[in-house]
């Protein structure tokens, strides 16, 4: 049927729901909402658009490779790590919404300069998770966790960061992959938005994401098998030798960027594991950071019907004792994580 000009015009305006519209709708549903959270997420989105732009042209803009510096984690800092870290810090410290930040790349708390306005939110982030993959054009991402400042604490007090995961106000990640996505939760489900570069807007693409009870994928770096304890080896062997929810063997998938492995497992169903590695002084409790990696993704996993544990307890029930605390991590479909816990407990 010949489309009329009006129908064509209408289609060109049919953008779908933008993240801003989504947030404003959520605000209407939350009487206590002040609009501060909407503004905070909007500031994070601007940072992510800048990072996405640089990630997408990294190969052309001399942004690949290392800076020659080593961060607090003992990892080589890559040019894009540094760009992403500075883009987030620069934007957030001027927002007037944050009273202190912690970045995986910075040893200490990032204070808001005295000449900048302060807000009531505490932000922890991994500016570019999996960045060692960027030279190979594999997916990487930014992970963020948002808490409210503790009323009686000074902005820069470490106590604002040493919190239980279940106290998070919101958590999410930006994924720089075949498309740029935002996946976040504020405690009312998990929602995914895809950046439409032609209009520069994040559009609702995955409403109310839920994980299947049991998955089909296991994600772990098996080159460390000899460094695990027997129970950890038994967990991985279980997934290697059992049938999944479709009655077929689990499929092994490991990108080397947790945010990308997590996202695939969130949508398809699976479990990601980074166990303790007793042979590596850097990783006696695993490699992943509680505040800026495990806790935010655990919040998302649980809001999507999944689960996350360090092998003995729920990740969200862990109260951080230091800024860069590391934890072993088993995260994904509820039944897969439960099975891992049973084996890890030696039951
Ligand atoms: P390995 C990236 O550095 C990261 O923190 C996760 O995103 C990723 O899953 C893991 O480390 C990869 O570590 O030891 O398997 O190379």
Image (cartoon, helix red, strand yellow):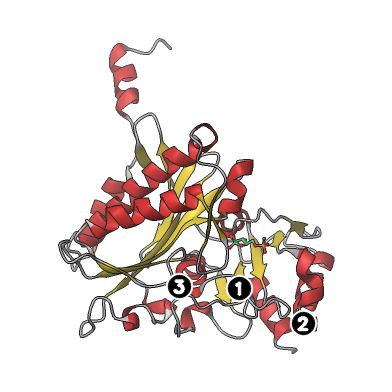
**Crowd band around label 3 with a 10 angstrom C-alpha radius: few (<14), some (14–19), many (20+):** many
Identified at 43% across, 60% down, the residue is 172
Task: Determine the CA span between mark 1 and mark 3.
Answer: 13 Å
**Crowd band around label 2 with a 10 angstrom C-alpha radius: few (<14), some (14–19), many (20+):** some
Q: How many marks?
A: 3
Element type where label 3 sits in the image: helix
Q: Work out whether residue 332 can be spotted.
A: yes
- The picture places residue 124, in percent across and down from the top left corner, at 39, 67
Q: Is mark 1 within 8 Å of ligand 1?
A: no
Left or right of 224? Residue 159 is left
- For label 1, the residue is 329
Answer with mark 2 or mark 1, whichever residue precedes in sequence. 2
- For label 2, the residue is 229
Q: Work out whether residue 26 can be spotted.
A: no
Answer with mark 1 or mark 3, whichever residue precedes in sequence. 3
Answer with mark 2 or mark 3, whichever residue precedes in sequence. 2
- The picture places residue 73, in percent across and down from the top left corner, at 54, 69
220 or 16: which is nearer to us? 220
142 or 28: which is nearer to us? 142
- The quadrant of the picture occupied by the C terminus is bottom right
Identified at 34% across, 31% down, the residue is 199
The residue most toward the top is 2
- The quadrant of the picture occupied by the N terminus is top left
283 or 345: which is nearer to us? 283
Q: Quadrant of residue 18?
A: top left
- For label 3, the residue is 291
Ligand 1 is found in which quarter of the picture? bottom right
Element type where label 2 sits in the image: loop
Element type where label 1 sits in the image: strand
């Amino acid at each position: 049927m010949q489309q009329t000009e009006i129908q064509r015009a209408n289609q060109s305006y049919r953008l779908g729901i933008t993240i801003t519209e989504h947030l404003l709708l959520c605000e209407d549903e939350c009487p206590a909402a002040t609009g501060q959270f909407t503004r905070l997420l909007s500031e994070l989105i601007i940072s992510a658009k800048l990072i996405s732009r640089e990630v997408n042209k990294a190969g052309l803009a001399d942004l690949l490779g290392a800076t020659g510096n080593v961060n607090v984690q003992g990892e080589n800092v890559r040019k894009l790590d540094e760009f992403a870290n500075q883009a987030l810090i620069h934007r957030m410290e001027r927002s007037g919404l944050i009273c202190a930040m912690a970045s995986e790349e910075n040893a200490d708390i990032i204070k808001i300069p005295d000449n900048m306005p302060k807000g009531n939110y505490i932000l922890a982030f991994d500016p570019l998770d999996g960045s060692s993959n960027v030279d190979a054009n594999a997916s990487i991402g930014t992970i963020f966790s948002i808490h409210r400042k503790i009323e009686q604490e000074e902005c820069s007090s470490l106590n604002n960061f040493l919190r239980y995961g279940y106290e998070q106000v919101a958590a999410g990640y930006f994924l720089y992959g075949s498309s740029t996505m935002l996946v976040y939760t504020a405690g009312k489900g998990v929602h995914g938005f895809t950046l439409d570069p032609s209009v520069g807007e994040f559009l609702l693409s995955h409403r109310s994401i839920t994980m299947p009870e049991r998955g089909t994928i296991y994600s772990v770096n098996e080159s460390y098998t000899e460094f695990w304890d027997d129970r950890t080896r038994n967990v991985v062997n279980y997934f290697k030798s059992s049938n999944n929810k479709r009655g077929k063997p689990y499929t092994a998938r490991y990108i080397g960027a947790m945010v990308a492995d997590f996202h695939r497992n969130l949508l398809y169903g699976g479990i990601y594991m980074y166990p303790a590695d007793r042979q590596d002084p850097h990783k006696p409790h695993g490699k992943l950071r509680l505040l800026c990696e495990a806790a935010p993704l655990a919040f998302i996993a649980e809001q999507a019907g999944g689960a996350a544990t360090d092998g003995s307890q729920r990740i969200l029930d862990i109260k951080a004792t230091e800024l860069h605390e590391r934890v072993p991590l088993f995260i994904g479909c509820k039944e897969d994580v439960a099975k891992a816990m049973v084996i890890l407990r030696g039951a």
